[in-house]
Image: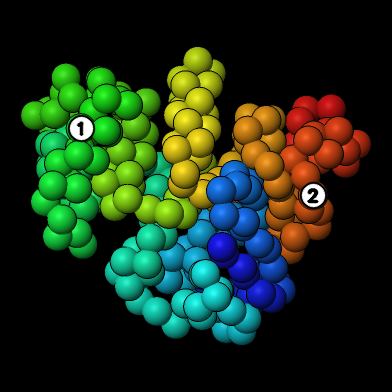
Amino acid sequence: MLRIDNINVYYGAIHALKNVSLEVEAGAIVTLIGANGAGKTTTLKTISGILRPRSGSVIFENRDITKLPPQAIVGLGICQVPEGRRIFPSMSVLENLEMGAYLRKDKQGIKTDMEMVFSRFPRLEERKKQIAGTLSGGEQQMLAIGRALMARPRLMLLDEPSMGLAPLLVREIFDIIKDINSQGTTILLVEQNAHMALSIADKAYVLETGEIVLEGAARDLMESEEVKKAYLGG
Ligand code: ATP
């Protein structure tokens, strides 16, 4: 479904991604794990068109999307859930969800999806008039995911959904991600919480200072001594 071929991304003189290649098959959960500053967010931003690689390409369903603007990429069915739950803090929960559907014109479909989001996240329905910036951290993460669902994505890019959440909530969010996947959305999940990410993913890549150093089936990486030592706390 998605293929990244040998991309190189720079921030000025900083070489943030070095010949990164990866593949996401339709229907899968693929995770990209790595420490702070490894280049995980940079990879997602390059897929969603926010950053341009200096070389290499991003192919989505056999189409080269490397040079497309972000809104065109959203229009093709790729939607990013940004790190740090970047919701619109001064808008209500309902307005945030409506923003997720801003490219769509199918009123009935939007209504159905809004109901689907509310049934998945009853807490958001109870709080639909609340100003989003006053939601708890976990609720904001749910809203960020809900907003992305409103775009009806075929590929969802998730940037560290576990960040700053209590363990119980992390589990809940990961269960939700699994469930969204089982309903047909392909997932590319970026995480520092390697244990949780590997436990739900089919395939995994390990990124270190801008380079892919390991890749394989998630369950194999979970057993790898290298991964255990560096990312799973021994
Ligand atoms: P984290 O888990 O801490 O979010 P990450 O793996 O997502 O890390 P990136 O945010 O992709 O890492 O950053 C990769 C590298 O690029 C880092 O060294 C970072 O300092 C650098 N970088 C990121 N954004 C910029 C920027 N706008 N200008 C300059 N350097 C940047």
Considering the numbered disc 2 on the image, is that residue within a helix, a strand or a loop? strand
Quarter in which the C terminus is drawn: top right
- Kind of residue indicated by mark 2: Gly
Q: Residue at x 41, y 60 (%)?
A: 78
Question: Is 132 or 126 nearer to us in this picture?
Answer: 126
Q: How far across and how far down the image is residue 43, in percent?
A: 56, 62
Which of the numbered marks, if any, corresponds to residue 60? none
Cα distance in 3D space between marks 1 and 2: 37 Å
Q: Residue at x 27, y 33 (%)?
A: 117
Q: Is residue 86 left or right of residue 157?
A: left
- Kind of residue indicated by mark 1: Glu
Specify whether residue 223 is in view.
yes
Which class describes the residues within 10 Å of circle 2: few (<14), some (14-19), or many (20+)?
few
Instruction: Respond yes or no on whether mark 1 lies under 8 Å from ligand 1.
Output: no
Which class describes the residues within 10 Å of circle 1: few (<14), some (14-19), or many (20+)?
some
Residue 122 versus residue 151 in the image, above or below: above
Q: Can you identify the residue that label 2 sits on?
A: 216
Q: Is residue 102 left or right of residue 24?
A: left
Residue 6 appears in which quarter of the rendering? bottom right
Q: Can you identify the residue that label 1 sits on?
A: 115
